[in-house]
Image (cartoon, coloured by chain):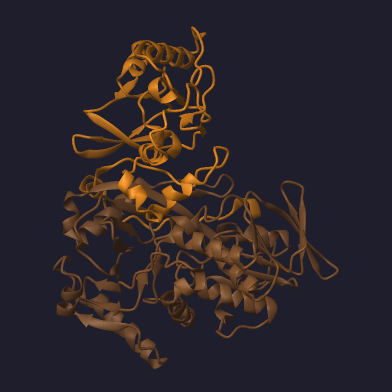
Amino acid sequence: MRADAIVVGGGLHGLSAALQLARRGRRVLVLEAERIAAHASSASAGGVRTLGRDLAEVPIALAALEMWREIASLVGDDCGYTQSGQVKVAETETELDQLAARVRALRARGWEHEELVDRDALRRLLPALAPHCVGGLVVRTDGFATPYRTALAFHRAAVAAGAVVREGARVVGLERSGGIWHVALADGTRATAPIVVNAAGAWGPRVARLAGETIPVRFSAFMMLLTSPLPPFVTPVVGAVGRPLSFKQLASGHVMIGGGHKGVADLDTGRVVLDIDRAAYSARTALDLFPVLAGCALEHIWAGIEGVATDDLPVIGHGRSEGLVHAFGFSGHGFAIAPAVGALVAQLALEGTTNLPIGPFDPARFGPARAGTG
Amino acid sequence: MAERIVIVGAGAAGRAAAALLPQARIVARPEATAWHAEPGRLWILERGQIDAVPFDILVVAAPVLHLLLALGCRTRAWRPVVDACGRTSAADVFAAGALVGAATADEAARQGRIVAQAILGRAPEGTIAVGAPPERVGEDDLLAASLGVTKVALRDGGIVGIATAARHRTDAEPIPFAPATPIPFAALAARAGERPPPRPLQIDEALA
């Protein structure tokens, strides 16, 4: 099949890029090795967060937040988006000082979205929080959405805009000749396009390697815990300064707990093995901060495989080869920015430049590509 | 035999296997609940505490498909894929009884004996054939039971995106998650010790 652009990877980022390219009138082919949203896109916590972002990511996160507010007009579904606010909790005065410094750094750059709150204001926001917490950082316009539902909505919207999405289509070869990418699939078929977008998530470095590029992005299996339903006790999404935690109560009453503890992933099989002792530490952290969890049940634990860069920033930018755009390695915080990144990828692919700064995400930032350093 | 054999379930299949494997450790309700498994370790809840039981050979003789899913064993139509002596796609994991589709206690016991004989290296007296798929009580019931989540959790959602995503997979595809069955949250938290060091990022050996 001949397309204008081929997107490798049918996760949320690949589908967002496909949507934006198709809306710009391009014939888009999405090649997904397994099923759409099979890994990180469905296993995500679904946080829509500008709070605590690396300063390099703030412009994109703020742009994405504007898109989330109108997400139904973008993809025809509200994606379960809830503007609940997000709070990062300080458990000690030292941690609170860190948050204050953070706010000063943001203010110096003209960003006002993060707000420092003291113990009393924190208590009003989070009445069920353990009393030892001394303050926090708040973004009242942050929130969360439903990850798999979001990926499905982007899929439907991309297809409605004319994109063709093939599942079970594993890319095994990328060759450029005559100004065209020749893409070989495991089933023996081929596809061609002048533009290839590498949105293969944890498998992004493998796709890059097919094009002769070494991008040393690693991977992790981030674990999530889900409790039995509880009566409503917390509205915002809660994180902590000193311990890995992302904590939210869904409309159904279930509490979803993540934050960075990892299991073990296998890229060849797509399988994960949970790390129960680290999941236990996650549970302990959540229980320390929200004693109300003492009586509930743990219903489920899962983990999704995600590409993670050593500097914890995504890879977004042109490859060394002409017509190749990378967008992967979102390092566990790509869900919120996906609507905006799709637009950036379309700009990169079609215009060569973007309306927001993406220099820090340059695929070449890891140094000269040397075989064997991956 | 130096091997650590663990049998999950004390129904007809589990008891028949245990009779031939007296050294095996039995994990059965109500005393102990097997709620999760990873290669070489079965996770149990016993007297309110969470513990890991190491195994060299695991016999799953209880209707807990989620354990096999967590171990990466292949399934088809909500049944484990097993060979004639009950061995799953994981060489050290066997399944017998109702989980495999045995319709009667006699059949479950027969399967339990065959599995035990295979583990002992004896010629099994007969073969195991996977039974018909479980009666369709509704996809949600099956999926919820198999994944160890409640139906409410499942229905909510897209919420349990991973479980919903599982609906769309085919039997031939890998299962990109490891399910567990409900346990007291505080029991899991109580297992936590000192804060564990962050697990290092994984490196793709295929690109090294």
- Outermost right residue: A178
| x and y percentages locating residue A235 in the rendered image | 25, 68
Question: What residue is shown at x 60% (from left), y 71% (from top)?
Answer: A366
Residue A311 shows up from this direction: no
Viewed as shown, does residue B122 lie left or right of B145? right
- Residue B164 to residue B99: above or below: below
- For the C terminus of chain B, the quadrant is bottom right
Q: How many marks?
A: 0
The quarter holding residue A182 reads: bottom right
Q: Position of residue A155 (x, y in %)?
A: 55, 61
Identify the residue at image location x=39%, y=15%: B108
Q: Is residue A88 visible?
A: yes
Residue A112, above or below B136: below
Chain in brown on the image: A
The quadrant the N terminus of chain B occupies is top left
Q: Nearer the viewer, residue A200 or B196?
A: A200
Chain identifier, orange in the render? B
Q: Residue A302 at x, y = what percent?
A: 40, 49
Which residue is at a point 47% across and 81% down the rendered structure image?
A63
Side of B201 where B5 appears, left or right? left
Q: In terms of depth relative to the viewer, which is nearer, B104 or A351?
A: B104
Find residue A254 and report its horizontal and vertical position in percent: 28, 55
Front residue of this view, candidates A341 and A276:
A341
**For this view, does B54 lie left or right of residue A1?**
left
